[in-house]
Amino acid sequence: MTTTNQPETIRHEDTTAAAGASRRAWITLLIAGLVEIGYAVSVGGSKGFTDLGWSISAAVFFFLTVFALSLALKNIDVGIGYAVWTGIGASGAAVVSAFLLDQALTPVRVFWLAVIIGGVVWLKLASSPKYASDQA
């Protein structure tokens, strides 16, 4: 058996399929983050799971957000995916709960939420194939 040291040929279809899977994974992660907002707000509204309607809502959102996150993590590194998911959830929950649950949203909190959102955006950009190939 002989082996050659020739580099493997990467077909265009393979890279296109991988890019499509990555794009779908990031969209799924975004959806998981948005559903996480619903979960966090529902838990806050449940008052320690004493309000039945909010408690049922929290259970449904919990199942959906974990399911969507698990799908996204098939194609996204766990550390990056989890950071993005929690960043979207934390920032979104703070904003939504200010309106639904009358919780304070001060300028200082808005600033730090913007920092979190900026970090999420940079994580996404740093995870893109173009950025990764530029760094190699």
Image: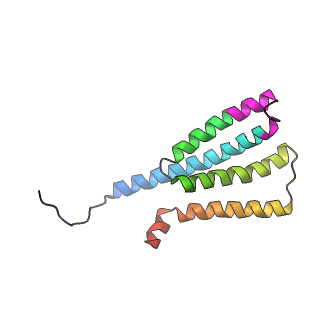
> In the image shown, does 16 or 41 lie closer to the viewer?
41
> In the image shown, does 54 or 10 lie closer to the viewer?
54
From the viewer's perspective, is 129 left or right of 65?
Answer: left
* Residue at the (67%, 44%) spot, across then down: 36
User: What secondary structure is the stretch in magenta mostly built from?
Assistant: helix
Percent x, y for residue 84? 62, 55
The residue sitting at the front extreme is: 48
Percent x, y for residue 21? 46, 50
Compared to 49, does 130 lie above or below? below
From the viewer's perspective, is 121 left or right of 107?
Answer: left
* Residue at the (83%, 43%) spot, across then down: 100
Quadrant housing the C terminus: bottom left
* Residue at the (79%, 27%) spot, across then down: 52
The residue sitting at the top extreme is: 52
Quarter-wise, where is residue 5 in the image?
A: bottom left
Color style of the picture: rainbow
Percent x, y for residue 12? 34, 58
Percent x, y for residue 129? 47, 63
Residue 46 covered by magenta stretch: yes
Quadrant housing the N terminus: bottom left
The residue sitting at the left extreme is: 1
Query: Which span of residues is magenta-colored?
Result: 44-59
* Residue at the (74%, 62%) spot, across then down: 114
